[in-house]
Image (cartoon, rainbow, N blue to C red):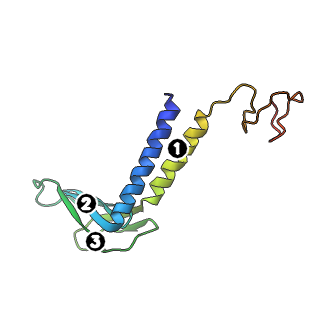
Amino acid sequence: MTRYRKLKWLSLILAGLFVAVALASTQYDFYLFSQSGMVGFYGGCIMVIAGRPSANASLPPIWSFRRARNAILWHPKVIPAGSFSPGTGTIVLVPLWIPTLVALAAAWFFHRKTRVSIAGHCKKCGYNLAGNTSGVCPECGTKA
């Protein structure tokens, strides 16, 4: 398997995972809390809180999972430190449709790179040029 085919499939798998997580995060919120911040999925978004180091830095990371009580967020959002609640860091929300779209665009790009042109066919559109003596594809006009 070529490098581009591997990248194409990796991109498609990532896009599928993003869609699955986006759908799951519309029903459930799940987070990983640590001393320095939090990462989680919330309302169809990736939520990152880059917080201040806590006073008790010896606590292990904590997982949280609960039923969602929020609406789906469709646009990126940055909430400055302290405006949400005292002592919190900057909150960054990135809707999962954005990385999904990027992964699908990458898959499309790598798919275009892996197309194999068959001998006797147009390199642009794939039209069968058997018997064509003009040297120009009648479908798309590309020189053969």
The amino acid sitting under disc 1 is Ala
Residue at the image position 42 percent from the left and 45 percent from the top: 13
Left or right: residue 44 compared with residue 127: left
- Reply above or below: 64 against 139: below
Estimate how packed mark 3 is, as few (under 14), some (14 to 19) or many (20 or more) residues with alpha carbons within 10 Å.
few
Estimate how packed mark 1 is, as few (under 14), some (14 to 19) or many (20 or more) residues with alpha carbons within 10 Å.
many
Mark nearest the camera among 2 and 1 is 1
Instruction: Point out the tag, 3 or 1, that comes first from the N-terminus.
Output: 3
Q: Secondary structure at mark 1?
A: helix
Instruction: Point out the tag, 3 or 2, that comes first from the N-terminus.
Output: 2
Residue 23 in picture, x, y percent from top left: 38, 62
On the image, numbered disc 2 is attached to which residue? 31
Gap between marks 3 and 1 measured at Cα: 39 Å
Asked if residue 119 shows in the view, the reply is yes
Estimate how packed mark 2 is, as few (under 14), some (14 to 19) or many (20 or more) residues with alpha carbons within 10 Å.
some
- Reply above or below: 141 against 64: above
On the image, numbered disc 3 is attached to which residue? 82
Q: Which mark is residue 107?
A: 1
Residue 71 in picture, x, y percent from top left: 38, 74
The amino acid sitting under disc 2 is Tyr
Closer-to-camera residue (28/61): 28
The amino acid sitting under disc 3 is Gly
Mark nearest the camera among 3 and 2 is 2
Left or right: residue 108 compared with residue 129: left
Residue at the image position 83 percent from the left and 39 percent from the top: 141
Instruction: Point out the tag, 2 or 1, that comes first from the N-terminus.
Output: 2
Residue at the image position 72 percent from the left and 25 percent from the top: 119
Query: Are circles 3 and 2 on residues that touch, CB within 8 Å?
Result: no
Tell how many labels.
Answer: 3
Asked if residue 46 shows in the view, the reply is no
Where residue 93 sits, quadrant-wise, is: bottom left
Mark nearest the camera among 3 and 1 is 1
